[in-house]
């Protein structure tokens, strides 16, 4: 059993990098990071990191457009 928190730093890094590359503002909020999962389950979650970075590029808000609308430009995952 491995704590999910052990790989959460990697997920934060993926989101931070995708945010920087796309110029979009994103906040990652992980709750329950201290839960323990089977190592095999965590290994199968690795493709989710790629999916998360793709979601930043496709779904998060364009900061300029949101500022014109007077809305918060930061997306939350």
Image (cartoon, rainbow, N blue to C red):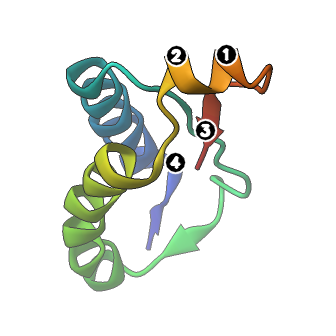
Query: Horizontally, is 38 left or right of 14 in the view?
Result: right
Disc number lying in front (2 or 3): 2
Q: Decide: marks 1, 4 in contact (CB < 8 A)?
A: no
Q: Decide: marks 1, 2 in contact (CB < 8 A)?
A: yes
What's the distance in space between the residues labelled 2 and 4, CA to CA? 33 Å
What's the distance in space between the residues labelled 1 and 3, CA to CA? 13 Å
Q: Residue at x 65, y 54 (%)?
A: 34
Q: Position of residue 16 (x, y in %)?
A: 36, 26
Q: Position of residue 11 (x, y in %)?
A: 36, 44
Q: Residues within 10 Å of mark 1 (few under 14, many from 20)?
A: few
What's the distance in space between the residues labelled 2 and 3, CA to CA? 13 Å
Q: Residues within 10 Å of mark 4 (few under 14, many from 20)?
A: some
Q: Which residue is mark 4?
A: 5
Q: Which residue is mark 2?
A: 64
Instruction: Give the answer, above or below, for where 41 lies relative to 56.
Output: below
Question: As rendered, which of 63 and 17 lies closer to the eye?
Answer: 63
Using the image, tell me which numbered label, if any, was put on residue 75: 3
Disc number lying in front (2 or 4): 2
Query: Horizontally, is 67 left or right of 57 in the view?
Result: right
What's the distance in space between the residues labelled 4 and 3, CA to CA? 22 Å
Upstream in the sequence, badge 1 or badge 4?
A: 4
Extreme-front residue of the structure? 68
SS type, badge 1: helix
Q: Decide: marks 1, 3 in contact (CB < 8 A)?
A: no
Q: Position of residue 58 (x, y in %)?
A: 33, 53
Q: Which residue is mark 1?
A: 67
Upstream in the sequence, badge 2 or badge 3?
A: 2
SS type, badge 3: strand
Quadrant of residue 71 in the image? top right
Q: Position of residue 49 (x, y in %)?
A: 27, 57
SS type, badge 2: helix
């Amino acid at each position: 059993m491995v704590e999910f928190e052990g790989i959460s730093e990697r997920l934060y890094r993926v989101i931070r990098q995708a945010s920087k590359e796309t110029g979009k503002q994103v906040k990652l909020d992980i709750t329950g990071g201290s839960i323990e999962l089977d190592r095999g389950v965590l290994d199968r979650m690795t493709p989710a990191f790629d999916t998360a970075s793709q979601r930043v590029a496709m779904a998060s808000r364009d900061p300029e457009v949101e500022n014109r609308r007077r809305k918060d430009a930061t997306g939350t995952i």
